[in-house]
Structure formats: structure tokens, C-alpha cells
Image (cartoon, rainbow, N blue to C red):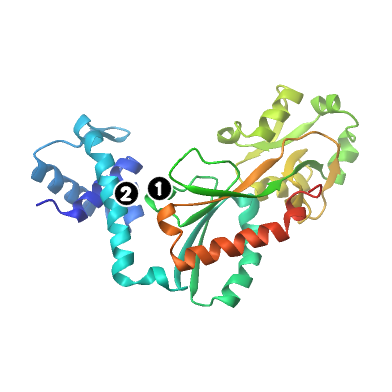
């Protein structure tokens, strides 16, 4: 008989590609992960991974059973919730995955109202540019700046996020204030990290400026905002986030920087979970209330 606990270790290694990363995900020790993985392979009589210098790569057998193992993981999570009866209570942990543009400046203070009304809800917020895997219940709900391609998820558009070009007075005094889009080619920028170059606002800036001078890069909005305020260069920032950073001046306010839709997403199995449904409804209402915060032209 296969041990479900061993499969949990298999899934973690398959997703992370290493014993150490899997151990962190499972809050255990690397030798434990290695031992359980070896036990599973011995029980199945098959090699599930190829051990490589850069980590663990799934074998053909490993790939063939990963999807089935994921289905078992989902079912086990559902059974656990049913057995404990926690789905019917407006209490317990709600894990929210959110990008830093929204998570720190808006979501955190907004959720004070939720916890005041529902003190039994325990909120766990993951602020990261990484996309949490909702289909594997790595979070209960997510606030995303794109429409998910995962057809099994339930989504709703709740706001639009507007961006602007900003600089510090000291920088503008030194380099001059741009009057046209063409002027941007003469400026330095506090820019997005390489991993975010696919974003619409980043592609727009690249089309306007070409190979621009980069003074600073980060995948974190608050780091870019702070660097801009010190006078390192111009930056594209969410308008509402820049308003919270003293010492920033908006330039070229009519620049047609692409806006991005804000989406709430969750797994359909969680729609009937009282604490998740309550949190979703609260956030949807809060986004509607604050829509002009995210896009003043709304």
C-alpha cells in the first residue's frame, strides 16, 4: 500500500527541483525528504527522478504519476476540511497571495476592517511577484494583475491599476523635466528587474526609449519608488503607490502607459468555504469602493 505522506515529499521535490527547497516547503529537514523519497522509489521499484548537478529532474515514470499525485493532494486537502468541519465556520486561516504593488500599501490596512468584523479569521499574506499555485492550494485566494490562464480557477475583475512616470525634484533639476516622450531617451531610469520585462508597462517604456540608461533595477515596487525618490532616475510606478512616497513628482501625465486589470482568483472548491467566501466578498467590495485610488480616471 502506498503511503500518502511519501507522495507529499515526491510532489514537493517535483515542484521545487531540490531536496533543500522541498524541505523548506514542508517545514522539515533535507535528510528526511531524501529518506522518504528513497522509500517511495523502493516501494514502487522505479526511479522517479534523475539526480543532476543542478537538482532533481523528473524521470519518465515520475512525470507520469505527478498529475495523479496532484489529484490525490487536492482530494486529501478537501477531505481534511470536511472532517474538521472548518468549511462552515467563518474562522480559521485564509492565505492570500498578492503582488507588492497592492499588498503593502492597500491590502494590509484594508484588511483591518475584515478582522474587526470577523475576529476568527486568521490572515496569512504572501507579498511576492511570484504567482501562487491556487490549483494546488498554495494559497486560498490571489490578487493578480493578469487574467489567469488556468481554466479551473474562479476569477473576477475588481479594479484597474494606472501607472505614471515619476522623478525626484533633485533629479529633474539636474537632468531637466521631459516635455515629450522623445525626451525620455535622454534620461536614466529606475527600472524593472529582468524577470519583469514582459510586463505591459515595461514593454511600453522599452518601445519609447529603446536601450535606455539604467541606474537601478528591482522586482519590488517599493524599492523602485524609494530609489526614484533619492534621485537615481525616472520610473514607472503605480500612481497610488507613488502618492505614498514623499518627494516624487509626476512627469508627462498624459503619457499613454498601459493600465492593468486587477483580478481576484480562487479555486472553485473553496467558494463554499465560509472564511474564504467572506474574505472574497469583503475584498471585492473594498476594491469597488476604492476604484479611484487605483485609477483616478475611473
**Residue 80 badge:** none
Tag 1 secondary structure: helix
Q: Position of residue 71 (x, y in %)?
A: 29, 47
Q: Tell me what residue is drawn at x 49 percent, y 72 percent.
A: 121
Q: Which residue is denoted by mark 1 in the rendering? A: 135
Give the side of residue 205 with respect to residue 176, left or right.
left
Tag 2 secondary structure: helix
Q: Tell me what residue is drawn at x 14 percent, y 42 percent.
A: 41
Please say if the residues under marks 2 and 1 sit with CB atoms less than 8 Å apart.
no
Q: Which residue is denoted by mark 2 in the rendering? A: 22
Up the image or down, 118 lies above or below 144; here it is below
Q: Position of residue 234 (x, y in %)?
A: 78, 38
Q: Tell me what residue is drawn at x 62 percent, y 71 percent.
A: 112
| Front residue of 199 and 282 | 282
Q: Quadrant of residue 256?
A: top right
Using the numbered discs, state the Cα–Cα distance from disc 2 to disc 1 in whole angstroms: 18 Å
Amino acid at each position: 500500500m502506498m503511503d500518502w505522506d511519501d507522495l507529499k515529499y515526491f510532489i514537493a521535490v517535483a515542484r521545487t527541483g531540490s531536496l533543500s527547497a522541498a524541505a523548506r516547503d514542508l517545514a522539515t529537514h533535507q535528510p528526511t525528504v531524501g529518506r522518504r523519497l528513497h522509500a517511495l522509489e523502493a516501494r514502487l521499484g522505479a526511479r522517479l527522478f534523475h539526480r543532476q548537478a543542478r537538482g532533481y529532474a523528473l524521470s519518465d515514470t515520475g512525470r507520469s504519476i505527478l498529475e495523479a499525485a496532484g489529484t490525490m493532494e487536492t482530494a486529501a486537502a478537501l477531505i481534511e476540511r470536511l472532517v474538521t468541519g472548518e468549511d462552515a465556520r467563518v474562522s480559521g486561516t485564509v492565505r492570500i497571495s498578492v503582488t507588492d504593488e497592492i499588498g503593502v500599501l492597500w491590502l494590509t490596512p484594508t484588511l483591518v476592517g475584515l478582522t474587526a468584523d470577523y475576529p476568527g479569521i486568521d490572515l496569512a499574506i504572501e507579498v511576492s511577484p511570484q504567482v501562487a499555485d491556487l490549483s494546488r492550494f498554495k494559497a486560498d485566494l490571489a490578487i493578480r494583475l493578469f487574467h489567469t490562464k488556468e481554466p479551473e480557477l474562479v476569477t473576477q475583475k475588481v479594479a484597474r491599476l494606472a501607472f505614471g512616470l515619476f522623478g525626484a525634484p533633485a533629479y529633474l533639476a539636474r537632468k531637466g523635466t521631459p516635455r515629450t516622450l522623445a525626451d525620455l531617451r535622454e534620461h536614466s531610469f529606475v527600472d524593472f528587474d529582468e524577470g519583469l520585462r514582459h510586463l505591459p508597462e515595461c514593454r511600453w517604456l522599452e518601445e519609447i526609449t529603446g536601450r535606455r540608461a539604467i541606474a537601478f533595477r528591482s522586482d519590488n515596487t517599493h524599492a523602485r519608488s524609494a530609489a526614484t525618490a533619492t534621485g537615481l532616475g525616472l520610473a514607472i510606478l503605480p500612481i497610488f503607490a507613488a502618492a505614498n512616497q514623499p518627494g516624487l513628482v509626476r512627469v508627462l501625465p498624459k503619457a499613454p502607459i498601459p493600465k492593468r486589470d486587477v483580478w481576484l482568483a480562487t479555486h472553485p472548491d473553496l467558494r463554499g468555504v465560509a472564511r474564504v467566501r467572506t474574505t472574497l466578498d469583503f475584498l471585492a467590495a473594498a476594491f469597488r469602493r476604492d476604484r479611484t485610488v487605483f485609477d483616478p480616471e475611473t
